[in-house]
Image (cartoon, grey):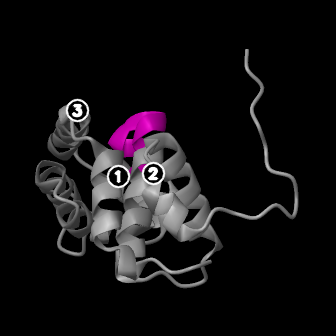
């Protein structure tokens, strides 16, 4: 097993330019997430990418439902727009249908309230919830590659940490 090289305290972090130019999608996503987490305020393009990186992490760890159950889901109301911004319209449509299950106000922005909303779904809504989560996972969008194209296209919207 190869050793994983870790940064030592005080080592320079990669510049936003080097992150955006990174061809390895895993390094791109990891370094960009680290960069965005260090920012106090995010521009609109940074917010789009951050929302979708968080979505990607949650979906990989437990599917669409995990996204809504955890703190990342606090931004669920803005998720469909972020997906559309990067060209993931099929996933955006699924998220819009999932958000509609929460009623006119959409998913709560507080995790505990959103969890209560999900627990209160009736049998019909619960069945639709399961179908939507399955449909979301079946859409084979190249998520990180889309994010990278979006970030490179909107390069001016990404600032230094």
Front-lying residue, 116 or 59: 59
Indicate which label's residue lies in the foreground, 3 or 1. 3
Can you say which quadrant of the picture contains the N terminus?
Answer: top right
Sequence-wise first label, 2 or 3 = 2
Report the side of 55 relative to 3 (left or right). left
Say if the magenta span includes residue 64: yes
Residue at left offset 44%, top offset 64%: 50
Q: Residues within 10 Å of mark 2 (few under 14, many from 20)?
A: some
Residue at left offset 31%, top offset 47%: 145
Sequence-wise first label, 3 or 1 = 1
Indicate which label's residue lies in the foreground, 2 or 3. 3
Q: Circle 2 sits in a helix, a strand or a loop, which is it? A: helix
CA separation in Å, label 1 and label 2: 8 Å
Q: Which residue is mark 3?
A: 134
Badge 1 vs badge 2, beta-carbon distance below 8 Å: yes
Q: Residue furthest top?
A: 1
Find residue 69 and name its label.
Answer: 2
Residue at left offset 36%, top offset 47%: 144
* Range of residues picked out in magenta: 59-67
Residue 33 location, x and y as percent? 54, 59
Find residue 142 and name its label.
Answer: none
Residue at left offset 37%, top offset 44%: 65
Q: Circle 3 sits in a helix, a strand or a loop, which is it? A: helix
Residue 45 location, x and y as percent? 35, 75
Q: Which residue is mark 1?
A: 118
């Amino acid at each position: 097993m190869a050793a994983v090289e870790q940064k030592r305290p005080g080592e320079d972090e990669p510049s936003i330019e080097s992150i955006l130019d990174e061809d390895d999608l895993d390094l791109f996503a990891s370094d960009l997430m680290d960069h965005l987490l260090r920012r106090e305020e995010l521009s609109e393009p940074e917010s789009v990418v951050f929302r979708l990186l968080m979505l990607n992490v949650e979906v990989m760890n437990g599917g669409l439902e995990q996204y809504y159950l955890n703190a990342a889901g606090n931004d669920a109301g803005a998720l469909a727009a972020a997906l559309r911004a990067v060209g993931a319209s099929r996933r955006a449509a699924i998220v819009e249908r999932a958000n509609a299950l929460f009623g006119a106000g959409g998913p709560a922005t507080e995790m505990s309230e959103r969890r209560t909303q999900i627990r209160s779904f009736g049998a019909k809504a619960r069945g639709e919830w399961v179908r939507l989560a399955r449909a979301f996972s079946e859409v084979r969008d190249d998520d990180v590659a889309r994010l990278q194209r979006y970030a490179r296209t909107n390069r001016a919207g990404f600032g230094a940490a």
